[in-house]
Image (cartoon, rainbow, N blue to C red):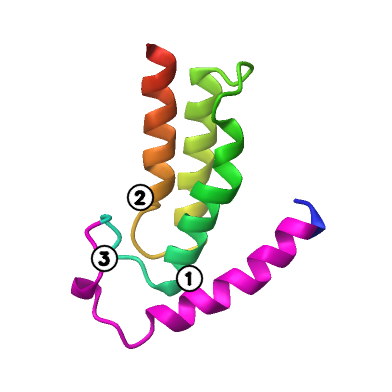
């Protein structure tokens, strides 16, 4: 990860975690993230919209590579005890598979 992206992550996560505190999950839009805590929400959002956007439109990323990347994300998500599921990231993976299927 580049130093620029690391710096963005260091600034982004505390803001999301702080914003999530004190809010009841039902106050949020239905993104399927009600089981996520602030840290999981920040990680999922950052991964989906900052990191995974790099695979969009790339001709050299095959459906098999997308599947392997998604498996890796899920494995590390669970292995690190993240709350809920990475719903935003899962949507990116699903959209890319559909787009490539034609």
Q: Are marks 2 and 3 in contact (CB under 8 Å)?
A: no
Q: Position of residue 77 (x, y in %)?
A: 48, 54
Q: Residues within 10 Å of mark 1 (few under 14, many from 20)?
A: some
Q: Position of residue 87 (x, y in %)?
A: 35, 50
Q: Earlier in the sequence, mark 1 or mark 2?
A: 1
| Farthest top residue in view | 102
Numbered circle sitting on residue 34: 3
Residue shown at 54% from the left, 30% from the top: 56
Q: Residues within 10 Å of mark 3 (few under 14, many from 20)?
A: some
**58 on left or right of 87:** right
Q: Position of residue 55 (x, y in %)?
A: 58, 31
With respect to residue 14, does 41 lie above or below? above
Q: Are marks 3 and 1 in contact (CB under 8 Å)?
A: no
Q: Earlier in the sequence, mark 2 or mark 3?
A: 3
Q: Earlier in the sequence, mark 3 or mark 1?
A: 3
Distance of label 1 from label 2 (alpha carbons): 14 Å
- In the picture of the structure, the residue carrying the numbered disc 2 is 87
Q: Which residues are magenta?
A: 4-30
Q: Are marks 1 and 2 in contact (CB under 8 Å)?
A: no
Residue shown at 54% from the left, 56% from the top: 46
Q: Position of residue 85 (x, y in %)?
A: 35, 54
Q: Indicate the quadrant where residue 92 lies.
A: top left
| Element class at badge 2 | helix
Distance of label 2 from label 3 (alpha carbons): 10 Å
Residue shown at 37% from the left, 40% from the top: 91
| Farthest right residue in view | 3
Numbered circle sitting on residue 39: 1
With respect to residue 55, does 27 lie above or below? below
Report how many numbered discs are placed on residues in the image. Answer: 3
Q: Main secondary structure of the magenta part?
A: helix
């Amino acid at each position: 990860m580049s130093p620029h992206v690391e710096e963005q992550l260091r600034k982004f996560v505390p803001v999301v975690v702080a914003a999530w505190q004190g809010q009841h999950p039902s106050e949020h839009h239905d993104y399927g993230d009600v089981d996520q805590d602030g840290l999981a929400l920040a990680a999922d959002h950052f991964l989906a919209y900052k990191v995974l956007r790099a695979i969009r439109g790339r001709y050299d990323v095959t459906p098999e590579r997308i599947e392997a990347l998604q498996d890796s994300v899920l494995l590390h998500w669970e292995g690190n005890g993240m709350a809920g599921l990475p719903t935003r990231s899962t949507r990116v993976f699903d959209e890319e598979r559909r787009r490539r299927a034609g």
